[in-house]
């Protein structure tokens, strides 16, 4: 399913961060920004959970209360969600579609929070660190599991959630106690087909859905059909899939894709730095969804904090990008890894452009850009021991826009990798019929230097569109060149089209059988080899002329020569010197 999303070098953007302002304006921002995002090269937006959370207008969206309330009903103290109203959400999707952007909805099925009432349930405590170990005797608890959605009054669905739709909670109201309580009853047990951390990682938070209950499965299918048809979303980001029965999403995706007739690109959040766990999930779900490449993010994080001592040759090791590229959604940061969040593992600002160049300009994976990296962020938080810290995330927009342009125009065709040095790595892209210009990308986490790379283009000039290096590099007659990079930086060298220059040699009086030619310091002019010089035309004899395609924006030294059966007469004096134009045409002259 991911191949269609990656067609034409697609780029996903996570269009929110954890501390997005709680002012209800995000959906309006999406609608307004859609044309700019599309023009920049973004092709799909992952939007945050659009339904009412337990904290109402303050809920980021993962404390799910009512998935049918998209900011339409007065529930949990507000009509709108954190991001806006239902009508604003639909308008944002319509604007995105009008500008050629796909929309991926964030689907949170693991749990429900903010129940309307408690219910009496028989339960047993289990160990936080080993969910398979029960302790103590069974206990009757008042659990927050009664969801009646009175504010919605059965609009869209009359389904009500009760204790038997769940298999555990972490709060007993009557006991005023926090613990993991596993429910007793017929069929009640943790779903076994889940991540194995903590013995069994079915339980995460709030009231945990029982995916073995047929009413739960049927209701989630009903919601999926309704959500796709009601909103027109083009795919899903699935939250916390490691905590949900693995086979559930295979069945659910097959059902929703079949009933809606849409391919519905899907990426799951199985957050693990162990690649084997990701491979196992991909196998268990039959490749029905892509996964976020958490190990790649961790490599970026480690590289950014290693002070130039990270082995860049291993940057892609043990990742989905390397081992399952067609199902890898590559990323640098997200709302869980940003400062003050539960999985905080910040990629330092200096390294972010290198990381984004890596995911945007290579052929592997489907890249995702994080909202806070594009627009920047400034917030104060006490979450996760942040102690009222002020956090500033620098905007990388100017650099990302150049990388997005490079992805659109140059990141095409065969790729040659040079991930073979502790500090300096690179790769080249050869282009294709529709994108004929070649590209060479090079980066270093340590000292500056250069790398000898094949670009498959002879006698072509390359300039660094990142603006980090001011040189012009010219490939040789075999298509190789030495591409430089500054320390702790990156460069994106792109082929400049050859420019036509009119070469003129005056006073070229010749004998029978003699010709006049131009020879110089580039391959196209023979690299000072008279046998490879370019013969000019005597149309304006004794002035000889010819239009020659030379590398753009390059310093060219050359001379006029007379050649006759291996005999060569050189123009006297200093070399003729030309700086070829970056575009258009030019002229240069010499004389005997």
Image: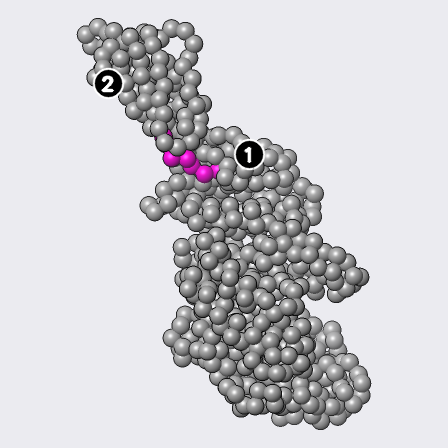
Mark 2 Cα within 10 Å, few/some/many (few <14, many 20+)?
some
Q: What secondary structure do most residues of the magenta stretch adopt? A: strand
In terms of image quadrants, where is residue 560? top left
Name the secondary structure under disc 1: loop
Residue at point 35%, 22% (across, down): 587
* The N terminus - image quarter: bottom left
To which residue does mark 1 refer?
A: 469
Relative side of 79 to 431, left or right? right
Camera-nearest residue between 334 and 451: 334
Relative side of 468 to 199, left or right? left
- Residue 16, given in percent of the width and then of the height, sits at 59, 63
* The C terminus - image quarter: top left
Relative side of 137 to 446, left or right? right
Mark 1 Cα within 10 Å, few/some/many (few <14, many 20+)?
some
Name the secondary structure under disc 2: strand
Residue at point 25%, 7% (across, down): 509
To which residue does mark 2 refer?
A: 537
Magenta-tinted stretch? 493-499
On screen, residue 531 above or below 50: above
């Amino acid at each position: 399913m991911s191949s269609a999303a990656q067609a034409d070098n697609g780029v996903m953007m996570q269009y929110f961060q954890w501390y997005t302002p709680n002012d209800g304006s995000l959906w309006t921002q999406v609608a307004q920004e859609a044309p700019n995002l599309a023009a920049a090269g973004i092709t799909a937006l992952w939007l945050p959970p659009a339904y009412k959370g337990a904290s109402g207008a303050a809920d980021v969206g993962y404390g799910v209360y009512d998935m049918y309330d998209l900011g339409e009903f007065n529930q949990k103290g507000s009509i709108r969600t954190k991001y806006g109203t239902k009508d604003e959400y639909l308008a944002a999707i319509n604007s995105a579609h009008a500008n050629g952007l796909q929309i991926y909805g964030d689907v949170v099925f693991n749990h429900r929070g903010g129940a309307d009432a408690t219910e009496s349930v028989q339960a047993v405590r289990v160990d936080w660190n080993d969910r398979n170990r029960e302790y103590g005797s069974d206990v009757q608890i008042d659990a927050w599991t009664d969801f009646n959605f009175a504010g919605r009054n059965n609009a869209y669905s009359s389904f009500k959630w009760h204790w038997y739709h769940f298999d555990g909670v972490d709060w007993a109201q009557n006991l005023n106690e926090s613990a993991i309580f596993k429910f007793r009853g017929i069929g009640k047990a943790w779903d076994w087909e889940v991540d194995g951390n903590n013995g069994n990682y079915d339980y995460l938070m709030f009231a945990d859905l029982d995916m073995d209950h047929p009413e739960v499965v049927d209701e989630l299918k009903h919601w999926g059909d309704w959500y796709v048809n009601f909103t027109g979303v083009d795919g899903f980001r699935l939250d916390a899939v490691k905590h949900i029965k693995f086979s559930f999403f295979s069945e659910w995706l097959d059902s929703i894709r079949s009933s809606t007739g849409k391919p519905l690109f899907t990426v799951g959040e199985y957050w693990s730095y162990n690649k084997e766990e990701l491979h196992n999930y991909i196998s268990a779900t039959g490749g029905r969804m892509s996964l976020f490449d958490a190990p790649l993010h961790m490599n970026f994080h480690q590289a950014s904090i290693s002070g130039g001592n990270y082995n860049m040759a291993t940057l892609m090791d043990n990742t989905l990008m390397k081992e399952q590229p067609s199902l890898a959604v590559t990323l640098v940061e997200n709302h869980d890894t940003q400062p003050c969040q539960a999985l905080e593992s910040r990629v330092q600002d200096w390294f972010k452009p290198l990381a984004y160049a890596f995911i945007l300009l290579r052929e592997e994976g489907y890249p995702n850009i994080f909202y806070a990296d594009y627009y920047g962020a400034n917030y104060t938080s006490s979450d996760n021991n942040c102690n009222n810290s002020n956090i500033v995330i620098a905007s990388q927009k100017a650099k990302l826009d150049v990388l997005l342009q490079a992805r659109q125009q140059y990141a095409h065709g065969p790729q040659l990798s040079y991930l073979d040095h502790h500090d300096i790595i690179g790769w080249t892209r050869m282009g294709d019929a529709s994108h004929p210009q070649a590209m060479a990308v090079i980066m270093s986490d340590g000292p500056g230097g250069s790398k000898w790379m094949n670009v498959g283009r002879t006698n072509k000039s390359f300039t660094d569109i990142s603006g980090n290096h001011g040189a012009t590099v010219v490939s040789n007659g075999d298509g190789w060149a030495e591409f430089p990079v500054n320390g702790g930086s990156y460069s994106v060298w792109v082929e400049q089209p050859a420019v036509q220059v009119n070469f003129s040699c005056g006073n070229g009086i010749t004998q029978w059988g003699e010709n006049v030619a131009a020879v110089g310091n580039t391959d196209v002019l023979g690299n000072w080899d008279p046998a490879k010089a370019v013969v000019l035309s005597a149309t304006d004899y004794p002035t000889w002329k010819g239009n020659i395609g030379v590398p753009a924006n390059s310093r060219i030294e050359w001379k006029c020569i007379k050649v006759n059966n291996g005999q060569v007469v050189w123009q006297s004096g200093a070399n003729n010197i030309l700086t070829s134009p970056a575009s258009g045409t030019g002229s240069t002259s010499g004389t005997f």
